[in-house]
Amino acid sequence: MPRGGARAVSGPAPDPTSLRSSKAMDKGGWRTLPAEGRGEPAPEWPLTTPSDREMELWEDLWAKPQAVAWEDMGQELEVALACRTLAEAERADGRVDVKKMVRGYLDSLGLSVAGMNRNRWKVAPAAEAASEDAAAGQDAPARRPSARDRLRVVSSGEGA
């Protein structure tokens, strides 16, 4: 077993709101993917003859926002292998090692939250949500209340 040193997936995933990650954004940056997805037909299947379920997964995955990045990086083969492995893992008699492979594909293709963070991808707000926010006059995103927001001033005559 290897000792010491960083691993490919060691440590916490990058946080786009942290100050340290904002420095990393200057170097590599976070990529914003379109909320509406890729919007084009799926590319041609690169492996041997697919099953019906593999083709369903293939079409579904290529409609996702992450597909924009896959297309730019030429990851058709990786996505096809993920579809084939996922179809096999879905079976009732699916092996555990195949299911572990699926998890790896989900992370590497940015289909899980951890994978999205590791790839430094985020999905843009949906067009409908952005227009509704603008119509409601909400320019800034909702802020989570801080501990200071929960405090209130108590005059000397209040309380018991």
Image: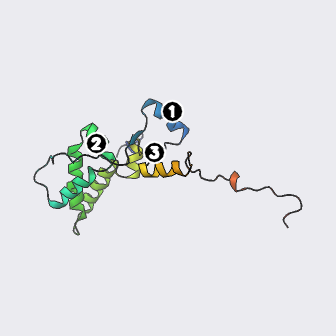
Residue 53, compared with residue 108, is above or below; it is: below
Tag 1's secondary structure? helix
Residue 12, given in percent of the width and then of the height, sits at 47, 46
Residue lying farthest top? 27
Which quarter of the rendering shows the C terminus?
Answer: bottom right
All told, the count of numbered labels is: 3
On screen, residue 95 above or below 67: below
Within-10-Å neighbours for mark 3: few <14, some 14–19, many 20+: few
Furthest-right residue in this view? 157
Is residue 129 shown left or right of residue 80? right
Counting residues from the start of the chain, the first of labels 3 and 2 encountered is 3
* Mark 1 or mark 2: whose residue is earlier in sequence: 1
Foreground of the two, 58 or 86 = 58
Residue 23, label in figure: 1
Q: Are marks 3 and 2 in contact (CB under 8 Å)?
A: no
Three-letter amino acid code at disc 2? Trp
Q: Secondary structure at mark 2?
A: helix
Mark in the foreground, 3 or 2: 2
Q: Amino acid at mark 1?
A: Lys
Residue 154, x across and y down, in percent: 82, 58
Mark nearest the camera among 1 and 2 is 2
Q: Secondary structure at mark 3?
A: loop
Question: In this rendering, would 110 be left or right of 142?
Answer: left
Q: Which residue is mark 2?
A: 70
The numbered mark, 1 or 3, whose residue comes first in the sequence reads 3
**Quick one: label 1, few (<14), some, or many (20+) residues within 10 Å?**
few
Depth check: give the residue in front, 89 or 62: 62
C-alpha distance separating marks 1 and 2: 25 Å
Q: Which residue bears the numbered disc 3? A: 11
* Front disc: 1 or 3: 1
In the image, is residue 42 above or below residue 73?
below
Q: Residue at x 23, y 53 (%)?
A: 59
